[in-house]
Image (spheres, rainbow, N blue to C red):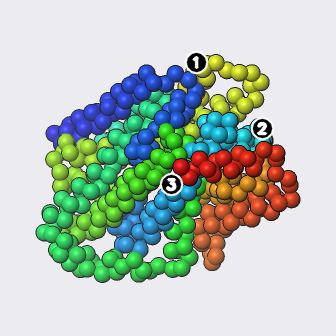
Amino acid sequence: MGTDLIWQVVSMLIYLIAMVTIGFVAQARTTDLGDFMLGGRGLGPFVAALSAGASDMSGWLLMGLPGALYLSGLVELWIAVGLTVGAWLNWKFVAPRLRAYTQLAADSITLPSYLGARLRDPYAIRLVAGAIILVFFTLYVSSGMVAGGTFFESSFGLPYLAGMLLVAGVTVLYTLVGGFLAVSWTDVVQGCMMVTALVLLPIVGVIHVGGPGAMLDAINAVDPSLLSFTSGATVVGVVSSLSWGLGYFGQPHILVRFMALTDAAEATAGRRIGITWMVLSCLGAAATALVGIAVYTHDTGQLANPEAVFITLGQLLFHPLLAGFLLAAILAAIMSTISSQLLVTSSALVEDIFRAFAGREISARGGLWLGRAGVLLVSVVAALLALNPSGTILDLVAFAWAGFGAGFGPTILLSLFWRRLTSVGALAGMIVGALVVFWWGSVDGGLFDLYEIVPGFLANLLVAVGVSRLTGTPAGVDAEFDEVAALARH
C-alpha cells in the first residue's frame, strides 16, 4: 500500500469512527419510538437545516453535478437553480405549517400518520402512503449501498462487496442505536464536510492555475460556450431542470426534518441557514467543475471520467491526508442519504403498517425496539438487493424523486393549505400522480422529454381537487385548520 493511500485510509477511518461515536452518544437521548423516529421534536434550526441539506443532496452534489458541468458547462446549472428555489419555498411555506399541523393532528411522527389524522382516515391512506415509502425507499437505500460499494472499489481498490458491506454496516449501526438524533447529528458533520470541501477545493484550484483570469482564459480556450447559461439549452430542457424544485414538497426524508423542529417559528432561521448552505454548495460544485476544465487543460489534458473531477482535483491539489477527508466528504454525502431514507422506511414499516394495524397499544420501550427491528429488516433487504446491482434498481431510483414529488407533493400542499381536501381525493390524486410519472417516463420524444414530475404533479393536483369537491369534508377539520394557521404565523 502506497504512502498516499495510507494517509487516505487514515482519514477515512477517523471519519467512520466519528460517525459511530455520534450514534452511541445519541443513544442516551433515545428512549421511545417518538425519540427514535423524530428526535422528540427537539431539533434546532441549524441541525434541521444541515440535516435536510445533507440528506437531500447525496453524492450527486459532489460527483453528478460537477461532472455534468465539466462536460456541458453552466447550462447544467439550471437544475441547481430549480432545486434552490424549491428548497426555499419548502422552508418558507411548508415547514412552519407542517410542524404545527403534525403535532396538532394526533402528534403524528410520520407523514402517512399525519395524513391519516388530518383526513380522518386511520387506515386506507396511511397504508397506501406507508407502502409507497416502504417499497421505493428500500430501493433507494439499496442504491445508496451500491454507490458506497462502488466508491470504495474505485477509490481504494476494495472488492465491491467489502466496500458495500462496510458502508452499510457503519450507517446501519449508528442509525440503529441512535435513531433520528444520530442521523441528524451525523448529517450536520457530513453537511459541514461537504460545503467545506466544495468551497476549499475551487479556491485552491484557482490559485493553482494562476488566478481567476487565467482560469477563464483556459476555459475559453477549450470552449467559450461552457461559460454560457443558454448555449445548447432548449425550453423543455430548462423547464425540466427547474421543475426538479417541485420534488421537495413530497420528499419524506426532508419533510420529516420540518416535523422535528422545536416549534414552527424555528423554520425562519432554518430556511436562512439551509438556503445559505445550499447556495454555497451548488456554487462550489459549479466552481469545482470550471476549475477542473482549466486544471486538466493546464496540467494533463482532458479528464477521462468527468464525474471524478472532484476526487481527481483533491488528489492533485492537496496532501493525501486532506485528500482523504475530501474523499470522506463524498462518502458522507452517500451515507447521510442512506441513513435518512433508512429511518423513514423503518418508520413506514413500524408506525404506519405494523403499529396502525396491531390493534393494541405498544409500550415506549417496545416501540423503540420495534423501530430498531424495522431499521435492521429494511437494511438487510436493501443489502441483499445491492449484492448484485441491477439496472432495474438503478432505473427505479431515477424515477424516485419524481415519484415522491408528484405522488406526495400536491397531497401535502393541499392538506396544509386547502381545508376541503378529503381522504378519497388525496388517495385518488396520489395514485394518479404516481402512475402518470411512470407512464410519462417510459415514453421518449417531443413533449415526453419534459421531466415527468411536471405532468405527474399537475395530474395529482387536478384529480385531488376534483374528487375532493365531490366528497364532503369531515367534521372538525375547519377548527383544526384555523388553529394550525394561527400557530404557523407565530
Would residue 148 be visible to someone looking at this image?
Answer: no
Residue 72: x percent and y percent?
38, 72
The local crowd at label 1, few if under 14, some if 14 to 19, many if 20 or more residues have their Cα within 10 Å, is: few
Task: Let me know if residue 22 appears in the view.
Answer: yes
C-alpha span from label 2 to label 1:
24 Å
Residue positioned 42% across, 80% down in the render? 230
Which residue does the image show at 36% across and 79% down from the upper left? 228
In this rendering, would 70 be left or right of 39? Answer: left
Q: Name the residue under label 1.
A: 365
Viewer-side label of 2, 3:
3
Nearer to the camera, 160 or 445: 445
Residue 217 is left or right of residue 82, and the answer is left
Q: Tell me residue 428's x, y (percent).
A: 78, 54
Quarter of the rendering occupied by the N terminus: top left
Q: Earlier in the sequence, mark 2 or mark 1?
A: 2
246, 155: nearer the viewer: 246
- Of the numbered discs in the image, which one, if any, rests on residue 123? 2
Q: Where is residue 138 in the image (x, y as percent from the top left)?
A: 58, 40
Residue 91: mark: 3
Q: Is residue 323 left or right of residue 128?
A: left
Answer with the quarter of the image where residue 466 lies.
bottom right
Front disc: 1 or 3? 3
Q: What residue type is labelled 2?
A: Tyr
The amino acid beneath tag 1 is: Arg
Residue 2, x across and y down, in percent: 18, 40
Tag on residue 476?
none
